[in-house]
Amino acid sequence: MTIKIEIEVDEAGIGQRLDQYLSGRPEVLAENLSRTRIQALIEAGQILLDGKPAAQAKTKLRAGQAIAVQVPEAAPAEPKGEEIPLNIVFEDEFLVILDKPAGLVVHPGAGHETGTLVNALIAHCGDSLSGIGGVKRPGIVHRLDKDTSGLLVVAKTDAAHQKLSKLFADHGRKLSLTREYLALVWGAPDRQAGTIDAPLGRHNLQREKMAVVPEERGREAITHWRLLEKFGADRDDKPVASLIACQLETGRTHQIRVHFAHTGHPLLGDRVYGGGFKTKAQQLPELAQQALKALNRQALHARALGFDHPVTREELLFESEPPKDFTTLVEALRAG
């Protein structure tokens, strides 16, 4: 069913951009239409100005002009819903926060057309999903690698998606956002805490990998860390591994994994960025070697996620205990 909204431009709208004016109108806000969605409707010819399709979002308005907004019913999501178990830690009409298991891909893509978190959320949320960008789909504002476990927030409405996207783009600099990870790394930093500030971009030769690159070629990437625990000793009597807590100031692809590999402390189990440390596993006690083999992935877990709710403004903070494969490895390392 198409929703129709008719508005006559008042004095407050004189000289305003069409998209800006509409995004502040109560009739439009009531339909949860974000400014991005309004711009998409303008491009699709669904917003009329004095009976004719509006030419551009930046069109300046005059008093008395008639605006007609036509909002088609949201189209079904292209990915199909699949009944995949989810560990939901919070859900309301605007968003859902879940504890993602390792091994679950977030978004459909080449080689992963089905069996993803998006497929699971489409089935779980059903009709509670509104049209994000005109399509009934969950709004992914940040991702976890397939083999990283932990907390993830997903928008269910267009308005929540827009506000959460701004929040994660800000990375907690001006807005309230907490993201903390636990990582097991080879060796140990020589300080108790620090910051890795190194731009990231695509690897020159292996395009599926990220790498630290010159500033002009990369995007800003900042990871704050603190040392929680050291384990064992290698042949040089240095810690063989350590447990690190990381807080992200930016959220680049593979950021923690690349940053710690760059400092000489790649994550345990990371086949992509820690391949040169395979022989290091032989210095672990037998139980730890078995636990690392059973982990079969990078030792990374998104432990904490907190922010102000994009609609209700309620302070939200959630913590997730690492999964059994991660804790088993930590206990084996402690046992020496």
Image (cartoon, rainbow, N blue to C red):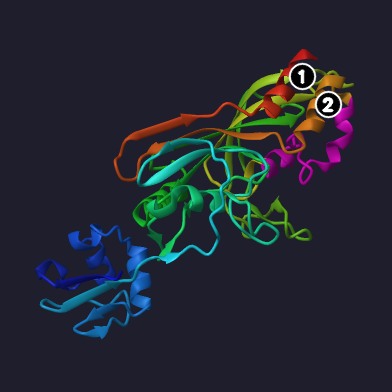
Which label was assigned to residue 290? 2
Which label was assigned to residue 69? none
Look at 77% across and 46% down and name the residue there. Answer: 272
- 259 inside magenta stretch: yes
Q: Earlier in the sequence, mark 2 or mark 1?
A: 2
- Identify the secondary structure beneath mark 1: helix
Q: Residue furthest top?
A: 335
Look at 64% across and 28% down and name the residue there. Answer: 244
Examine the image and state in which quarter residue 7 appears: bottom left
Marks 2 and 1 in Cβ contact (< 8 Å): yes
Quadrant where the C terminus lies?
Answer: top right
- Give the residues in magenta: 257-282
Q: Amino acid at mark 1?
A: Ala
Q: Residue furthest bottom?
A: 52
- Horizontally, is 238 left or right of 5 in the view? right
Look at 73% across and 60% down and name the residue there. Answer: 207
Q: Nearer the viewer, residue 286 or 3?
A: 3
Q: Which residue is mark 1?
A: 332
- Identify the secondary structure beneath mark 2: helix
Examine the image and state in which quarter residue 233 appears: top right
- 55 inside magenta stretch: no
Q: In the rendered view, would you say 1 is above or below 196?
A: below
Q: Disc 2 and disc 1: Cα gap in Å?
A: 9 Å
Q: Nearer the viewer, residue 132 or 309?
A: 132
Residue 146 in sight in this render: yes
Q: In the rendered view, would you say 155 is above or below 238?
A: below
User: In x, y percent, where is residue 25?
Assistant: 19, 62
User: In x, y percent, where is residue 282?
Assistant: 90, 27
Residue 61 in sight in this render: no
